[in-house]
Amino acid sequence: MFLRKSFCLILVFVLSKCSVDIPKEVALEIESLPESIDFNYHVKPILSDRCYACHGPDAKTRKAGLRLDLESVAFSKLQTNNRAFVKGSIYRSESIHRILSDDPDIQMPPPESNLNLSNRERAILIKWIDQGAEWKDHWAFLPPERKFPSQESQQFFSNEIDQFVYDKLKEKKLDFEPIADKETLVRRLTFDLTGLPPTIKQINKFLSDTLDGSYERLVDRLMGSSAFAERLTLDWLDLSRYADSHGLHADGLRTMWPWRDWVIKAFENNMPYDQFVTLQLAGDLLPNATREQKLATAFNRNSPMTAEGGVIDEEWRLHYVFDRTETFSTAFLGLTVACAKCHDHKFDPISQKDYYQLSGFFNNIRELGMTGDDGNYGPLLYLPNDDQEENLNDLNKVVNKTKFKLDLTKKELSDLYKYVNDLPSKNQIDKNLIGYYPFDKINPVKTKKNSQYIISEKSSLKPDYFILDENRNVKAKQSPKLVKGVSGKALEFSGDYDRVRIEKEIPSFEWTDPFSISMWAQTYQKKENSRQFLLGTTGGKNNWWRGWDFYLDDKNYVNLRLINIAPGNMIHIKSKENIKVHEWNQLAFSYDGTGKAKGVKIYKNGRAFDFIAKIDNLSKSIKPVTASGLKLEKRPILIGKTYEGSTGDNGLFMGKMDEIRIYKKELTDLEMRILYNQHSKTKDKYEQELIKEYWIKNNPKYTSLKKELLKNLNSWREKIEPVVEVMVMEEMSKPRKTFLYNRGNYNEPSKVVKTNTPEILPKMKDGYKKNRLGLARWLFQDDNPLTSRVAVNRYWQLIFGNGLVSTPTDFGVQGSLPSHPELLDWLSLYFIDKNWNIRDLIKIIVSSRTYKQKSLFGKEKNSIDPNNIYLSRASSHRLPAEMIRDNALALSGLLSKKVGGPSVKPYQPKGLWKEKNTFSLRLLEYKESQGEDLYRRGMYTFIKRGSPPPSLITFDATSREICIIKREKTSSPLQSLVLLNDTQFFEASRVFAERIISQSKNDLSDQIIYGFRLATSRFPKESEVKLLKELYLNKLSFYKKNKGEAYKVINIGASKTKFYKKAPQVAAMTMVANTLLNLNESYYKY
């Protein structure tokens, strides 16, 4: 007190001498301030809240050249030659004159900002400057310090956590509450560690265990259960924005549940947190990465994806990159970097350049911006079950054995070969010709077996083919016409035209079917603006682009694709040489049916091109399918224009085509040369190597083995078709350039940036590659100040409801300060010392006296610490949505104990999906699960982002569209209505009632006590038993008189009652059970 009075006297003297008019109310606030003003805890929150908007990190909005987030600038001379802050001098500090001024031209913050300083905030700034204006870097960017709590002896302390908490309580003149009774503890701990209520058996076991260490043994038992792993997984699903649908436009089906099962398994095995995070960020980049390590990277493919026709692919691809960048920052750094996508962060020292450099880590996978309505999109990972794995391995052995025989035969035949001069005849080549189109007239053209058709606008055609780009209101302006070709007439495409197709008699090729195509083409295309489709069967986005196509890209390079689903399961090869404009070229390809890029050849003028295999990853069917892959489709071959109208990539060909030939075999180099020479003005020679290859590949022994190989490959393909696939991360071989985009606009790249971490944080160690693996390792560098703090804060929040930093997504200057900074740092270092052991961290938290104390408290404590920031009592809050449901199912005995597996669809009101869905065919209607799947834990419920489970959303579950670290907490009448009337809860009440009745068939009091204890984990008071008995008897009287109503009650839900003959009794007890489930004690944690 003496020091404070002395300071005030000195201050009054200084200010009067220096002509600073300090208001009386500010002087009074100065007297009430702490003896020492700390920059981070007292000053910086004021500057960031009131000043950074104009004087912060964002250079574009900075005024007067003043930057208050950097010490060097904050204390430097202003444009007016004054200084905002002068250490130790209030009079010379321009900021003090301005914050005390009433002149609107001088006042800070200026009136138009609608910001103002309180008298206490003015007082803080005045005292800070007078004390020397000591500057500190932001607390979260400094390494954690290992400070120890006071050594005051307290017998009731369980561990160091209690010492730190007690020091803060003492400072606030508070104290701990007494330790809670054992019934409360076992209930609290069981919910916190497993998300489920304790059974009476578990309660009794804990109550009867009076030996030392009983609590620790309970902790260990709970942590050793699968339920503990599921509890931690639920929290992680919010963070990782896991869902079972894509969200956004079509909100179609995706399959990602195997990744969720990986997370459960990781927690079951107590995987260290550093390994857990590293695998999810970069498991695919580890040396000799296993399937499980690759599966972990599905974490970064959980982002929503759009299927909206007409969106710009690159714009949305970048959306996914930015989503990963922001999820990474939120989840592991606790920073809001999203602000820096369009401009430098206005509060934190995160520049726009920092944002895009960080995004570079996630910018190097081959993915689409626009997907189909349903399905997974590459990169993909196959996850066969044990039986499938065994079958595929057996077939692989058979395939490899046949390949070996074929290679051996090829060598033997090569050794036997002697000079041959005979060439195959045209009839021999055409033996496997299934389609020939010389375009001499646009009419049916006969082949040996059937008729094929070239269809144009003038032909008899279904209405769908008269439209332009799938728009039924727009007709094409042009039709292909006949002009002079390489032989007779050719088909010329000179404008936007209707589709031209080959009629359906051409079979759909499978990737195990060898086939070849030869054609002559002359392109007019000079502009590098779009590809030109020659011919093929590939579908649109909703058909997963499935099929094959042959086309010229925007620079007239020749491309061939065989697609199951783009871009993850396909072959894509591209010639190394392009073709010239306005010149006739024979363009052709042959494919051998082996599913590999090396089994493909592309030709120009009878000679094989060198090519680049852009993608070589084909395993599943390429036969065309209907929308969303519901069934196979007989899709005609199109010429000159694709099926992809809705994507804007029509592949419009401008030029001439002639002499299209389709073969159901792999043509050799010799045969391609012969086909070229038929219409070439200059005749190429036939080298012996060409004749030798033809002779070998047409040898009966070779063809027999090749037929056997293709049969075995097809068997393998059939076995892999049903195998589950998951979207994962996979680096491109050639890194993609990363740009800084003006205002975040995809079409305004301003400059290339190098992949890197934010400048404010420690640099990556030498030797770490600038990829996702390097990023993961950087997270766990010894000098990274955020990773451990952010993780510890999140697990503290998991147990207490609030973190030591109450803004878990913002450890920046706008975030809350830690309530117990020394404790946060101590736990962060403890976590690291324990090798990032999550169980050890949670165990020390739940073993503390701080955790064990009672949650009830008096009025005085409520007035001092109403939000329990200082932890003077145990936290009390409503259970998360999934746990409320699980609690009801567990009490009834309906809850399934099955762990993992596909997502399930429990009860929900009819018609919700159909009402909100117009595109996804696989999620058009909600198909309710059956049997055990109706009663799985809430974490397994199918999450459709556009229509999330209504009962869960009512209790603040999320739609999983973004990374969520802390759910909102609301209270509404709807929540009570769900507990009272929702089918799941009412059925649980009825089965709970049957369980209560089964406990004691004759004694109503025993039944009530048993049910109450199950629901609350404690024995009821006499008054509570009396009220519930009255309720039961009242309802029993009603249902005996109205048995029809009783039967309605006992028939709610899919489970069958065992007490049909006691319908009134079950219905009456159902009302009691429903009441118990609606008690706060039932679905709140105390």
Image (tube, grey):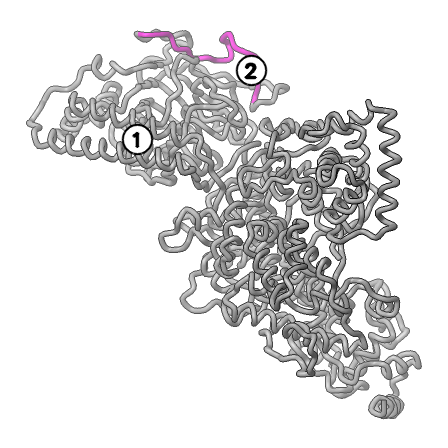
- Residue 912's label in the rendered image is none
275 and 501: which is toward the camera? 275
Left or right placement of residue 786 versus residue 860 in this view: left
Left or right placement of residue 584 versus residue 525 in this view: left
Residue at the image position 45 percent from the left and 58 percent from the top: 773
- The question of residue 526 being in magenta is answered with no
Q: Which residue is mark 2?
A: 466
Residue at the image position 47 percent from the left and 50 percent from the top: 364
Query: Which image quarter: residue 965?
Result: bottom right
Bin the neighbour count of mark 1 within 10 Å (Cα to Cα): few under 14, some 14-19, many 20 and up: many
Residue at the image position 67 percent from the left and 37 percent from the top: 946
Bin the neighbour count of mark 2 within 10 Å (Cα to Cα): few under 14, some 14-19, many 20 and up: many
x%, y% of residue 520?
A: 33, 23
Quick check: 820 above or below 11? above
Verify CB contact (< 8 Å) between mark 2 and mark 1: no
x%, y% of residue 68?
A: 70, 73
Which span of residues is magenta-colored?
A: 449-468
**Amino acid on which disc 1 is placed:** Thr
Single out the residue that lies furthest toward the front: 1002
User: Which of the marked residues, 2 or 1, is nearer the chain's N terminus?
Assistant: 2
- Residue 594's label in the rendered image is 1
Looking at the rendered structure, the secondary structure element under dot 1 is loop
Quick check: 18 above or below 954? below
**Amino acid on which disc 2 is placed:** Phe
995 and 487: which is toward the camera? 995
Left or right placement of residue 595 versus residue 751 in this view: left
Q: CA distance from mark 2 to mark 1?
A: 38 Å
Query: Which image quarter: residue 536?
Result: top left
x%, y% of residue 544?
A: 49, 30
Q: Quadrant of the C terminus?
A: bottom right
Quick check: 930 above or below 56? above
Quick check: 450 above or below 775? above
